[in-house]
Amino acid sequence: MKQIVLAILLIAVSIAGMSQGINSKAIEINNSDSDKYTTIETTKIKIILPDGFTRKNATTYEHTLAESYISVQPLDGDVNRNFYTFDKKTMFQAGIVVMKETFFKINGFEAMMIDGDQYINEKEFAVSILLIGNCTQTYLIMGSTPKPIQNNLNIEITTSLLSVIFDPNMETTQTSSAFSYKVNLEGTGLIECTPMGTTRTFSDDGNLPSKTDEMTTLTIHEVRSAHQLNETQKKEISSHMINLYPLVWDKNSDLTPKKYSTGKLSGYEIHASGVNKLMKTEFIYQLVLFANGRYYLLTGISYGNENKWLEAFRKLANSIDY
């Protein structure tokens, strides 16, 4: 790990430089409220949704036939610091390869658009993420659609994100949970971070990425399945996902999917260790749990004690209640 003092200095310089750069090269957009706008419940955000998108929950809208969604999540703190946090490395850890970053000033508020690609279940998705806010609060708006793009839906999603109206004085309403399942973190040593779209992330200190020496995180990504999967297909999904990791696996590692049951859900588990490009050993945990019409992909990463975090990851997985 980098020395703490040096890291703090580099972050401070980077944030200051980024803030100055944004002011000089940001694209200005002015949006006016109208009856075309949808207010995203529990947030201070309004956007114009593309045709065909319907409410899934308080903060997520989806186009079921197109397997596409738009989701809004709050983030803690200053928007400029969050620009720095969501760098290419962090996005890669979340499974997103960043292709482009663009800065905006929307209704006077600083914003950054991240465009990238994400691979889920052997499918490639176009992903757009907009960060917008002020010195005390930030919102992450994320849109995703499968590639190859049909009917320019990725352009429609990008246009929707850029239609945003952020009003820090807007009153928010509280509704039910944004996710279709619950988890119990008691005894796991994990703290939930701010979600990204349909992905929930937990880390050993509540930060993403984790700031501890062990840098332990676990993500749960919920995937809708258009058809019933047989056992061979379920195993193939598990094998495909674990082989995407850019690691040199330990010679004793077994990447064969093993049957796993939580009591309510069943699927396949793999856990193994490997060396990354920085020559550091990572412990990787993967569990795919299948339900009717969907499955949950759990991915754990740690530089700490393998047995300790294997037990913690399993404890959280066993608590999933949908």
Image (spheres, helix red, strand yellow):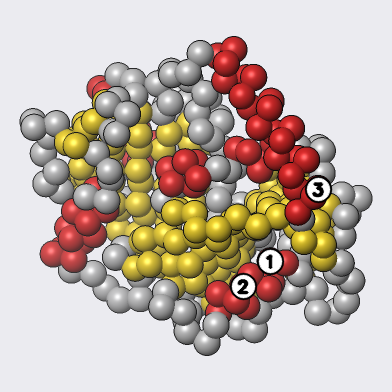
Which kind of residue does numbered mark 3 sit on? Asn
Residue for badge 1: 161
Query: Whole-percent x and y of residue 220?
Result: 42, 47
**Residue under the image location 8 percent in, 32 percent down:** 251
x, y percentage for residue 239? 19, 53
Residue in the foreground of this view, choosing between 67 and 228: 67
Q: How far apart are labels 2 and 1 at the CA level?
A: 6 Å
Q: What is the quadrant of residue 25 in the picture? A: bottom right
Q: Nearer the viewer, residue 284 or 182?
A: 284
Of residues 52 and 133, the one nearer the viewer is 133
Residue that mark 2 sits on? 157
CA–CA distance between discs 3 and 2? 25 Å
Mark carried by residue 80: none
- Which corner quadrant of the image does residue 245 belong to? top left
Crowding at mark 1 (Cα within 10 Å: few <14, some 14-19, many 20+): many
Placement of 230 over or under 184, stated as above or below = below
Q: CA distance from mark 1 to mark 3?
A: 20 Å
**Residue at point 24% right, 39% down?**
247
On the picture, is 45 further left or further right than 230?
right
Q: Nearer the viewer, mark 1 or mark 3?
A: 3
Asked whether residue 277 appears in the rendered view, the answer is yes
Residue designated by label 3: 23
Q: Residue 56, can we see it?
A: no
Q: Left or right: where does residue 74 sit relative to residue 133?
A: left
